[in-house]
Image (cartoon, grey):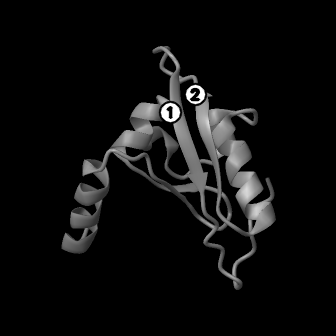
Amino acid sequence: MTQNSERLDAILDSVAIGIIALLPDGRIELQNAEASRILGTSSELSLGRTLVDCLGAEHPVVGLVAEALAAQRPVSSHACAIQPRLGSSSLVVDLAATPMVSTTVPRARW
């Protein structure tokens, strides 16, 4: 891991906002500590897998990402109930998804 990569990881893990970045094929490339806490799944288990594999097709995050990709614009949803996978009580969170799709790489189908 490079020094810049380590610094970026430290910054992302220090913010109190859950951040997940997806590769063009839909696999999780990055998941910070707050996203892991909110979703109840560790980044070690999530990286390289799709959101559907990690969270299930009916999860609000999966639906919001699919909506953002279909609309090709940022979308958000407020006061969403999220049931973490590790059995803790549900959380109410605001969600946002912003597509950053390359025109040279095919998008994943949701």
Tell me whether circle 1 and circle 2 mark residues in contact (CB < 8 Å).
yes
Lateral position of residue 42 relative to residue 26, left or right: left
Task: Residue 42: tell me if it is visible.
Answer: no
Q: Label 1: which residue?
A: 39
Lateral position of residue 73 relative to residue 49, left or right: right
Q: What residue is shown at x 45% (from left), y 52% (from top)?
A: 19
Residue 68 position, x and y percent, is 71, 59
Q: What residue is shown at x 47% (from left), y 28% (from top)?
A: 40
- Dot 2 crowding, Cα within 10 Å, few <14, some 14–19, many 20+: some
Residue 31 position, x and y percent, is 44, 50
Q: Label 2: which residue?
A: 82
Quarter where residue 12 is shown: bottom left
Q: What residue is shown at x 45% (from left), y 15% (from top)?
A: 88
Quarter where residue 7 is shown: bottom left
* Amino acid type of the residue that numbered disc 1 sits on in the rendered structure: Leu
Q: Secondary structure at mark 2?
A: strand
The extreme front residue here reads 78
- Residue at mark 1 to residue at mark 2: CA–CA distance: 7 Å
The extreme bottom residue here reads 104
**In terms of sequence position, does the residue under pointer 1 or pointer 2 come before the other?**
1
- Dot 1 crowding, Cα within 10 Å, few <14, some 14–19, many 20+: many
